Each structure stands twice: as structure tokens, then as C-alpha cells.
């Protein structure tokens, strides 16, 4: 081993990109008011679910005429619910610049087998040509690529006069980035990302245009029960008032409510964005003076402030074979985990070898400041 270990360790070494760090100060005591041993359709159960919807609307500043529903299967379930329910009437443009975007390409092209589709791609670290999308088409895209650390910088490329729907997977963007609601017809996320809630539940948000599509179009393929948002050609409004399609975990709902209340206490959406930006700033300041690293997202305007992906640019590393690079990156993450200073910080398995450090609002800036000397120390051990 080389070099002296840093003197200060992160108080909370939780830098996983999902499920993400719990909010500061969280303990199981936060769940004591959960509605347990009761039906989720009971008055108290429905009340909790409706409260979660109402607080979501308030924190995210979702327009009053947009519907918000809690659904099964985390963000993946929410996205697939939208794809399988809404796509078909129009051509589809699918944007992909990392693994989850590729998943939606698979759904649209290989599973739904929609013929009139365009796949617009870019490699890890870059964005595709957003302006090449056609406003007459439905557009499927991520706001933030969780496995690449590349986000869309804004919604200026989306036409206000579009004919198609925009379906946005915003799971690692919601609560950390500004979402231009009038540009978005479907937004999905999981509360286990930026708010550090417990996993398995998704949220789907529908614009009036998306509701109109649901009520005017019936897909020609079988629709699983957990995807069905209409009955006899009308939206099932109860879904968006807390009457979930299937049974939710009321413990997870209580945990989400706790996270939302914490979010309100740190200044709501503006406060959450400021915390994420400050966390990213720590890594940007460190990278600016650290020759062995750079960001996978080359353009700062499209650099994520949540799932921050770091690539290794040291000449020693660059001289390694591809297998050697992958092995070295794994060793780096393993050293950090062994020392208990950064848990689950390895890059995504399909991404270029490197690190992925979550900087969402539930992470404390002081913990990132404590982490950066450990990153340098750990790299020195792997390179030695």
C-alpha cells in the first residue's frame, strides 16, 4: 500500500445510484405512523396514498391539471405502463445514450414491434441530436441517463406545438432538476432515487394530452392488469386519487411521505436542486485539480448533478487492455468499499469502466468533501 490514509471518513458512505442514501437523520422511527395491518383501500390507507400524491404535486410544482398516480414496478413499471398504453397511433422517436434508453428501444422495437420508429442514439458520455426529433412523432427519452451521468440540459428542443406525446423517464432527475412540465406529457420516476425512499413503487404523471390519448386510443395488444388506466374508454380517476391498481407497501408509502416532508423542510424543489448542485460542485472542484480523472459527460451543460459518472484518464490506465481497465475499475471500487468510505460506487456494468458517485439531495456535501481524498488514495493503491 502506498501513501497515508486520509484522516477523515465520510460520516455516511452511501453513494449508491439506487436505492440511494436515506435522507439525513433518518431512522426507522420515521415509519411509526405507517398504516399497517389495514387495507390500502381503507380510509386511513387511501388517505396516506392521497397525501403522497398531493405532496408530490406541491414539491415538484406539477400543474393542477396533470394526474399523478402511484404504480407498480418502480420507474421501470411506470415507463412500461406508459409505452404499452399510449404508443401506436403515431410514429415514435426513441432516444438512447445509455443502458436504460436502450431498454426502452427494446420495448418499442422488439416487444411492441412498432414499425414506424426511429432510434436516435449516442455513445456513453454524449447526447444524441435532440433537435432531430420530429414533433409530429411520439418521443421517448430519459431526462437524465442514470448509467452515463448525461442529462438533457433543457426542454427547448421540444416543440410547444407538437402533435405527438413526450414520454420522459425522469427517475434520477425528478427532485433534482427543473422539469418543464408544459413540454412533457408523461413523466415517470421512482422515489428510491433522489429522495432515498424504499424501492418497488413507481410514479406516473400524465398531462391532459396524455389523458386524451388514453381515452381515444385502445392498443391492439393484450394489456396486463397493472398497466390498465382506462375502463370503457374513460380514465380510471381513482388511480390518481390514491386507489392504486395493486397493493402497495404502506411502509414504503410512509417512508416516501417522510422524505417529502424532509424535502419541504430543506426548501422544496429549489432546496433539493441546490443541494444536488452543491454536491456536484465538490466533485467538479476535485476533478479540476486531479489529473487521473475526468467526467464521462464531456459537456458541463449536460452533466448530471445526481448520477455523476467519472472516467479514469491516467496514462497507466489508458495503456491497459479493455479487460484490464474493467478489472482496475472494479478494484478501485472494492478498495473504497473495503475501507467503508464509499459503498456501491462502481460504474454501471455496461458503461465505460470508472466510478459512479451519487450526488442527489440526500447526500451531504461534507461527506463528498471527505470522500475525495479517499478517491485519490484508493487510486494510488490500485495503480501501485
Image (cartoon, rainbow, N blue to C red):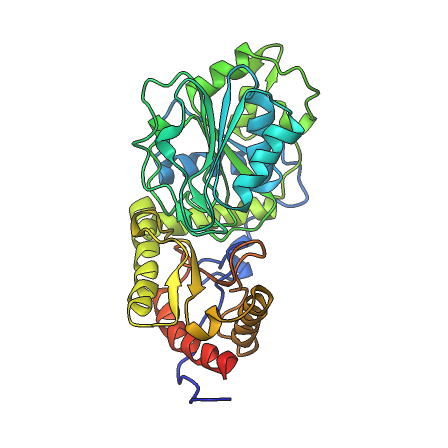
Q: Nearer the viewer, residue 372 or 40?
A: 372
Residue 136's spot in the image, x, y percent? 42, 17
Drawn side of residue 182 relative to residue 214, left or right: left
Any part of residue 243 in sight: no
In this rendering, the answer to whether 311 lies above or below 331 is: above
In this rendering, the answer to whether 221 lies above or below 197 is: above
Any part of residue 254 in sight: yes
Residue 297's spot in the image, x, y percent? 38, 53
Residue 130's spot in the image, x, y percent? 37, 34
In this rendering, the answer to whether 295 lies above or below 374 is: above
Drawn side of residue 76 relative to residue 12, left or right: right
Number of numbered labels in the structure image? 0
Identify the residue at image location x=31%, y=21%. 160
Identify the residue at image location x=45%, y=42%. 122
Q: Nearer the viewer, residue 377 or 45?
A: 377
Identify the residue at image location x=51%, y=23%. 92
Residue 289's spot in the image, x, y percent? 29, 72
Amino acid at each position: 500500500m502506498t501513501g497515508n490514509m486520509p484522516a477523515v471518513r465520510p460520516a455516511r458512505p452511501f453513494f449508491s445510484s439506487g436505492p440511494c442514501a436515506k435522507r439525513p437523520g433518518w431512522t426507522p422511527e420515521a415509519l411509526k405512523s405507517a398504516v399497517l395491518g389495514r387495507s390500502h383501500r381503507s380510509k386511513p390507507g387511501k388517505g396516506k396514498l392521497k397525501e403522497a400524491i398531493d405532496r408530490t404535486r406541491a414539491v415538484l410544482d406539477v400543474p393542477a391539471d396533470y394526474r399523478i398516480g402511484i404504480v407498480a414496478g418502480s420507474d421501470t413499471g411506470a415507463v412500461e405502463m406508459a409505452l404499452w398504453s399510449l404508443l401506436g397511433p403515431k410514429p415514435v422517436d426513441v432516444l438512447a445514450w445509455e443502458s436504460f434508453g436502450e431498454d426502452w428501444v427494446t420495448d418499442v422495437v422488439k416487444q411492441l414491434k412498432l414499425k414506424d420508429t426511429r432510434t436516435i442514439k449516442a455513445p456513453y458520455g454524449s447526447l444524441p441530436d435532440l433537435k432531430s426529433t420530429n414533433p409530429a412523432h411520439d418521443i421517448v427519452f430519459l431526462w437524465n441517463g442514470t448509467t452515463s451521468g448525461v442529462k438533457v440540459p433543457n426542454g427547448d428542443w421540444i416543440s410547444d406545438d407538437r402533435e405527438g406525446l413526450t414520454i420522459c423517464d425522469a427517475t434520477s432527475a425528478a427532485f433534482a432538476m427543473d422539469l418543464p412540465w408544459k413540454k412533457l406529457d408523461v413523466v415517470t420516476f421512482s422515489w428510491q432515487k433522489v429522495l432515498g425512499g424504499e424501492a418497488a413503487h413507481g410514479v406516473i404523471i400524465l398531462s391532459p394530452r396524455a389523458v386524451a390519448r388514453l381515452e381515444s386510443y385502445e392498443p391492439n395488444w393484450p394489456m396486463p392488469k397493472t398497466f390498465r388506466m382506462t375502463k370503457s374508454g374513460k380514465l380510471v380517476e381513482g388511480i390518481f386519487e390514491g386507489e392504486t391498481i395493486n397493493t402497495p407497501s404502506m411502509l414504503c408509502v410512509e417512508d416516501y411521505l417522510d422524505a417529502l416532508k424532509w424535502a419541504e423542510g430543506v426548501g422544496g424543489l429549489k432546496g433539493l436542486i441546490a443541494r444536488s448542485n452543491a454536491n456536484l460542485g465538490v466533485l467538479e472542484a476535485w476533478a479540476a485539480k486531479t489529473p487521473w480523472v475526468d467526467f464521462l459527460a464531456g459537456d458541463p451543460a449536460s452533466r448530471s448533478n445526481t448520477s455523476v459518472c467519472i472516467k479514469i484518464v491516467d496514462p497507466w490506465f489508458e495503456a491497459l487492455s479493455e479487460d484490464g481497465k474493467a478489472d482496475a475499475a472494479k478494484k478501485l471500487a472494492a478498495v473504497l468499499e473495503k475501507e467503508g468510505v464509499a459503498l456501491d460506487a462502481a460504474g454501471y456494468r455496461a458503461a465505460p469502466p470508472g466510478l459512479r458517485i451519487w450526488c442527489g439531495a440526500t447526500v451531504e456535501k461534507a461527506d463528498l468533501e471527505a470522500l475525495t481524498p479517499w478517491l485519490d488514495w484508493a487510486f494510488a493503491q490500485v495503480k501501485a
